[in-house]
C-alpha cells in the first residue's frame, strides 16, 4: 500500500512539476487587494506579483512554465476587468478555460481520441499509436468521461458565481475547492486507469515500443 501511495505521489510530481502555485497565488492576492484598495490598484498589485514570480524563476533557473502561463492569463484577465470596470470580469478567462476544456473533452470522445490520452502523451512522451489500440483506448475514453463531468461542474459553478457577481466565492472555489477537487479527480483517474488497463490485457507502453507479442505483462506504472 505504501509503495502504491508513493507511486501516486511521484506521478503527481511528474504532472504538477513546475510550481503550480505560481498560477494560484496571484488571484488570491487580487481578492485580498480588492478588499483593501480599488480595482486598479488590485490589478497592479496582482500583476506585479506575477512578474516578480516569473523573474524569480528565471533568476533561479527553475521551470518558468506555470509562472509564464500565470502572467499571460493574468494579463488577459486584467484587460477584461479594466475595460469592463467590474472585478467579476477578471475571471472571464478562467470561465472560458473551463468551458473550452469541457468542449475539448466532449469532442475527443466523439472522435474517439480521448483527451486523457493526449494529456498523458504530452506529459510522458509515449507514442500516440499505443493509446489508440483497442486494448488500451477504452481506459482513456472512460477517464475522459470523468474529466468531462469535472469540467462541467467547474464551468457551471464558475458561471453561477459570475452571474451573481460573487467574486470572493469564485476565488475561494477555484483555489480551496477547485484545485483539491482536481487532485482528487486525477487520483481517481490514475487508480482507475491502471486497473482498467490491466483488465484490458493490452501491452504496456514499453512492450508496445519493443513490438513484443502476447501474452503481455501489461502496464504496471503510469497512466
Image (cartoon, rainbow, N blue to C red):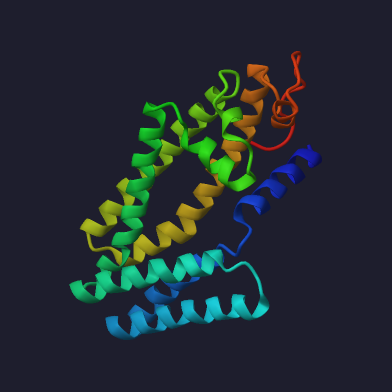
Q: Is residue 38 visible?
A: no
Q: Where is residue 162 in the image (x, y as percent from the top left)?
A: 25, 59
**Looking at the image, which is closer to me, 171 or 23?**
23
Q: Position of residue 28 (x, y in %)?
A: 44, 71
**Looking at the image, which is closer to me, 205 or 144?**
205
Q: Identify the residue at image location x=19%, y=72%.
A: 84
Q: Position of residue 140 (x, y in %)?
A: 53, 30
Q: Identify the residue at image location x=30%, y=46%.
A: 156
Image height of 154 relative to 85, above or below: above
In the rendered image, the residue lying farthest to the right is 3
Q: Position of residue 129 (x, y in %)?
A: 58, 29
Q: In which quarter of the image is the N terminus?
A: top right
Q: Using residue 88 as the reference point, say whether residue 196 is left or right of it.
A: right
For the image, the number of numbered tags is: 0
Q: In which quarter of the image is the C terminus?
A: top right
Displayed quadrant of residue 169: bottom left
Image height of 158 relative to 151, above or below: below
Displayed quadrant of residue 44: bottom left
Q: Is residue 151 visible?
A: yes
Displayed quadrant of residue 108: top left
Q: Identify the residue at image location x=36%, y=72%.
A: 75
Image height of 192 relative to 80, above or below: above
Q: Identify the residue at image location x=47%, y=65%.
A: 69
In the rendered image, the residue lying farthest to the left is 84
Amino acid at each position: 500500500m505504501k509503495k502504491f501511495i508513493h507511486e501516486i505521489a511521484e506521478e503527481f510530481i511528474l504532472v504538477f512539476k513546475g510550481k503550480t502555485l505560481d498560477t494560484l497565488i496571484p488571484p488570491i492576492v487580487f481578492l485580498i487587494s480588492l478588499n483593501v484598495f480599488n480595482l486598479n490598484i488590485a490589478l497592479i498589485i496582482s500583476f506585479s506579483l506575477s512578474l516578480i514570480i516569473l523573474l524569480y524563476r528565471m533568476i533561479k533557473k527553475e521551470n518558468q512554465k506555470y509562472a509564464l502561463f500565470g502572467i499571460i492569463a493574468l494579463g488577459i484577465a486584467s484587460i477584461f476587468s479594466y475595460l469592463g470596470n467590474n472585478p467579476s470580469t477578471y475571471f472571464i478567462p478562467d470561465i472560458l478555460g473551463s468551458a473550452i476544456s469541457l468542449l475539448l473533452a466532449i469532442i475527443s470522445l466523439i472522435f474517439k481520441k480521448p483527451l486523457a490520452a493526449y494529456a498523458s502523451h504530452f506529459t510522458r512522451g509515449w507514442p500516440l499509436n499505443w493509446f489508440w489500440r483497442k486494448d488500451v483506448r477504452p481506459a482513456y475514453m472512460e477517464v475522459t468521461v470523468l474529466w468531462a463531468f469535472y469540467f462541467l461542474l467547474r464551468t457551471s459553478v464558475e458561471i453561477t458565481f459570475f452571474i451573481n457577481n460573487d467574486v470572493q466565492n469564485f476565488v475561494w472555489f477555484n483555489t480551496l475547492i477547485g484545485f483539491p477537487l482536481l487532485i482528487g479527480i486525477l487520483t481517481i483517474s490514475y487508480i482507475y486507469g491502471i486497473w482498467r488497463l490491466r483488465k484490458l490485457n493490452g501491452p504496456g507502453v514499453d512492450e508496445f515500443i519493443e513490438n513484443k507479442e502476447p501474452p503481455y505483462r501489461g502496464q504496471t506504472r503510469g497512466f
